[in-house]
């Protein structure tokens, strides 16, 4: 039968982890070959010397020494920690577990504390792998954050480009249906509004306006003065109309108006008189120059003057020329025959 002491000796000799036994005074009493390799122990120095002088000549190992002291003086607690250990200029990591050694109780008294045993394994590779994994995760997180920032910036640029493109498209669409100089609807837009009014089927009036005397001012004072005059005329015309009415510049010095909810000549007359008075008031220009123009207005009522946009606009145009011949007083054309409708 194998003696237990021999079994334990062989286990300690061949175990991969280090084992270190200290007495109550902190002297090294026993250690196995693994502990000798890991800690640099030697039999010559162990035994009568305190473990601090045997193990820890290097101040870098103070944490290891403190861990053993904690185990010696705090016997009621089990200590388990990872600690750096420095030997021959190299740093390793050891996981150390310490437990108190107790004697067997006797007739003379209970069990008493006789020392401490420390078991430790080299976890340097695990620590290095953990540190490398942490560095890799940090690098990955940094790259993810960097890429996320790049994507956010790219997305912001894309949103700005889309918004700019939408604004450009809206501007193009606006310019396609509005006069650049006065910002009023142009002929194309006006004809669409006129078609919508006809489709609505309710009574309304179409006014065709032509400025008298504008060409002479434009030729005499230049196009800049003429453009400014047209802009002022547009503002005055808008001030004569209601919110739901439509004012457009058809081209040159010609304008057109759709007056909604108008059914009789009596309803149109105050609006026309107001337009003639406002447009005919003098305009200030550079220096003390005063510009004077007038306006001829032709009126066509729906459905009396026509039932199609083309017929209504032609009727108002004819009425405008008749107004010019009659001294610029507003003229309402007679009801059209079947060819004009």
Image: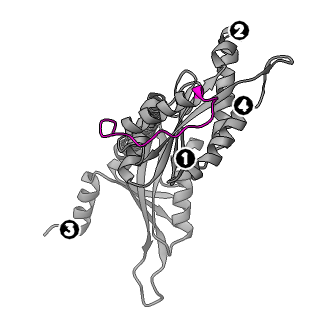
Label whose residue precedes the other's in the sequence (4 or 1):
1
> What span is in magenta?
324-341
Cα distance, mark 1 to mark 2?
34 Å
How dense is the environment of label 2, judged by Cα within 10 Å: few (below 14), some, or many (20 and up)?
few
Label whose residue precedes the other's in the sequence (3 or 1):
3
Cα distance, mark 4 to mark 2?
19 Å
Q: From the image, tell me which residue sits under label 4.
A: 280
CB atoms of marks 4 and 2 within 8 Å: no
Measuring from the top left, give residue 165's x and y in whole percent: 44, 31
In the image, is residue 9 above or below residue 230? below
Q: From the image, tell me which residue sits under label 3.
A: 3
Q: From the image, tell me which residue sits under label 1.
A: 245
Comparing marks 4 and 2, which lies closer to the viewer? 4
Local secondary structure at mark 1: loop
Whether residue 141 is visible to the viewer of this picture, yes or no, is no
Local secondary structure at mark 3: loop
Cα distance, mark 3 to mark 4?
132 Å
Local secondary structure at mark 2: helix
Measuring from the top left, give residue 106's x and y in whole percent: 42, 86
Q: Which mark is residue 220?
A: 2
């Amino acid at each position: 039968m194998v003696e237990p002491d021999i079994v334990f000796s062989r286990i300690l000799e061949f175990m991969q982890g280090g084992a270190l036994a200290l007495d109550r005074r902190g002297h090294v009493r026993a250690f196995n070959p693994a502990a000798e390799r890991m800690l640099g122990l030697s039999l010559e120095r162990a035994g009568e010397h305190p473990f601090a002088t045997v193990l820890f000549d290097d101040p870098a190992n103070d944490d290891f020494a403190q861990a053993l002291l904690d185990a010696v003086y705090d016997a009621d607690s089990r200590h388990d920690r990872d600690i750096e250990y420095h030997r021959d200029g190299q740093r390793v990591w050891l996981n150390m577990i310490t437990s108190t050694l107790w004697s067997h109780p006797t007739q003379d008294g209970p069990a008493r504390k006789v020392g401490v045993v420390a078991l430790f394994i080299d976890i340097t590779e695990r620590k290095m792998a953990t540190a490398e994994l942490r560095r890799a995760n940090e690098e990955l997180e940094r790259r993810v954050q960097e890429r996320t920032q790049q994507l956010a910036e790219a997305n912001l640029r894309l949103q700005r480009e889309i918004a700019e493109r939408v604004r450009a498209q809206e501007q193009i669409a606006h310019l396609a249906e509005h006069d650049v100089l006065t910002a009023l609807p142009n002929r194309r837009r006006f004809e669409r509004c006129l078609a919508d009014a006809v489709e609505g089927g309710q009574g309304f009036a179409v006014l065709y306006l032509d400025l008298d005397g504008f060409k002479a001012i434009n030729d005499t004072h230049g196009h800049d003065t003429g453009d400014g005059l047209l802009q002022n005329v547009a503002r005055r015309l808008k001030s004569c109309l209601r919110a739901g009415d439509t004012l457009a510049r058809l081209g040159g010095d010609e304008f057109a108006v759709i007056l909604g909810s108008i059914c009789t000549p009596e309803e149109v007359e105050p609006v026309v008189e107001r337009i003639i008075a406002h447009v005919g008031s003098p305009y200030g220009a550079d220096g003390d120059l005063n510009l004077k123009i007038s306006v001829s207005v032709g009126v066509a009522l729906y459905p009396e003057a026509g039932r199609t946009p083309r017929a209504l606009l032609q009727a108002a145009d004819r009425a405008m020329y008749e107004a010019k011949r009659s001294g610029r007083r507003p003229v309402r054309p007679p009801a059209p025959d079947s060819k004009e409708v």
